[in-house]
Amino acid sequence: MVFAFSLLSVLSLVSVVGPAGTWSGALVDSKCYASKQGNVNPNETSFASTDTRGAVRYCSPTKKTKLFGLVLKDGSAFKLAPSGNKKVLDLLLSVGKKDLYVVDVTGEENRGAVQVESITMAK
């Protein structure tokens, strides 16, 4: 019985933390992006009613951004865990101001947020 409980505990932990991976996409101010994505006509039910490209450009992060996100080419988005903010800010400062930051992020997904191990400009 104790073994079954321990195995169940381990399996539940595995489901919370996703495998390490690399994601490529546009870096955004997560709070701004969520607001823009939620700002749609309530009578429109199609996904096309949201302007993802416009939201990505409008919500391009600055050095004052506190919460970062990553929008993939397919339109899906991830939040970046606050523990990686210093790495993201260091990248922003080293690259300088841009209208669009396309980056590669390596890390682990944990409860809808990516724990950033490394972040670089996409090539």
Image (tube, helix red, strand yellow):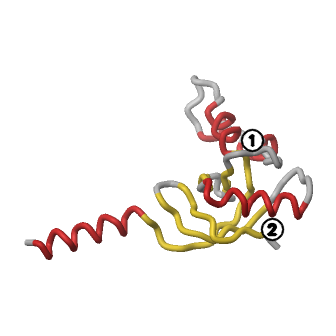
Q: Which callout, 1 or 2, points at the residue further toward the start of the chain? A: 1
Residue 32: % across, % down: 70, 38
Give whichever of 53, 78 is nearer the camera: 78
Whether residue 57 sits left or right of residue 20 in the image: it is: right
Picture quadrant where residue 121 is located: bottom right
Q: Is residue 22 above or below residue 74?
A: below
Work out whether 94 lies above or below 77. below
Q: Residues within 10 Å of mark 2 (few under 14, many from 20)?
A: some
Residue assigned mark 1: 55
Question: What element does badge 1 sit on?
Answer: helix
- Read off the residue under disc 2: 121
Residue at 78%, 57% in the rendered image: 89
Amino acid of disc 1: Ala
Q: Position of residue 3 (x, y in %)?
A: 14, 76
Mark 2 secondary-structure assignment: strand
Numbered label attached to residue 68? none
Q: x and y percent of residue 97 in the render?
A: 91, 53
**Quadrant of image for the C terminus:** bottom right
- Amino acid on which the number 2 mark rests in the picture: Met
